[in-house]
Image (cartoon, helix red, strand yellow):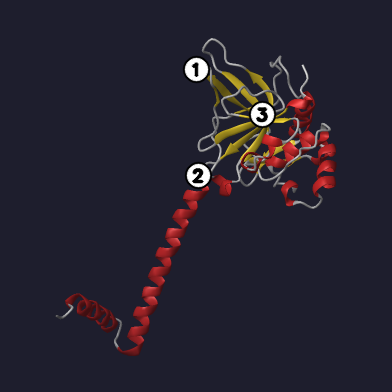
Amino acid sequence: MLDFRRSRRRNLFWLAVAAAGGGISGVVVVVVSLVIMLSLLLTLSLQVDGKSAATTPSYSSSSLSLSKASHNWTGKRNQAVVNAALYIASGLYNGPPEGYDSWYHADMIPDAIAYWQRTCGGCAAWAQGNLQCVMLISAAYGLAGQPLPYVGTAITFYTSGAYLHAPGYEELSPDSMPIPGDIIVLDSPYFGGVGHVMLVVDVQPPKDGTPGYVQFAQANGPGPINQEPLYQDANGHLHMAIWDNYTVKCYIRHVAALTD
């Protein structure tokens, strides 16, 4: 059986060659034209994909950014770590390209700079404009005299299971009550799934159906100090609201360092 569709494709090609003047020069003109058209289509496709990726938000703009933390929590806490985290946060600011607080005024936080130089000299993780969330957490605990027994990428604070067995530490479920000094571990598909960590600096518990809040210090987020609502359901379970496509996996608490 003859393949009339294949025959028609050959005819269209040669008609185009003929329209271009025929001969070898006509073939060259048609081939070059096809290559240019394909290149334009590919470029347009890449531009659309790139714009889509660039405009996909990593953090919700609904997160309340604070110039300083409140002091409403009255229970046990790890105040030394909170103080250190607020000290570091005081020197951070949002900058390009994403608008995250991965930038810092080095002259405002010399103790943190010295700690990073001592523990991770030359690391890109605390380079200006690239300060990572884990660096704030590790420095806050380090400056408080409580060096962490395990440090990895943010999500591995949870997935490694290290704090399930670390002496003096507890890993609490996300429906627990966070307290100042806790590390919040978040999971997210963004940035290759490395997650995010933050440090609780104040908590207002929910009461009589009214949501409370959690305030936290962080690096490489939407601001040095942010606040999110803390809800309680009918069964007494707590739920800290967080950005779209982020999930609270656990709280990590240094129980051996808690004070009233």
Q: Amino acid at mark 2?
A: Thr
Disc 1: which residue? 235
Which element type, helix, strand or loop, lies under badge 1? loop
User: Which picture quadrant has residue 168?
Assistant: top right
Q: Is residue 13 above or below residue 233?
A: below
At label 1, which amino acid type do we have?
Answer: Asn
Q: Is residue 69 above or below residue 113?
A: above
> Which label sits on residue 56?
2
As drawn, the label of residue 216 is: 3
Contact, mark 1 vs mark 3 (Cβ under 8 Å): no
The spot of residue 219 in percent (x, y) is 69, 38
Looking at the rendered structure, the secondary structure element under dot 2 is loop
Labels 1, 2: front one? 1
Tell me if I can see residue 102 in this picture: no
CB under 8 Å between discs 1 and 2: no
Q: Between disc 2 and disc 3, whose residue precedes?
A: 2
For the point 69% across and 45% down, which residue is it? 152
Q: CA distance from mark 2 to mark 3?
A: 24 Å
Task: Name the front one of labels 1 and 3.
Answer: 1
Q: Is residue 3 above or below residue 230?
A: below
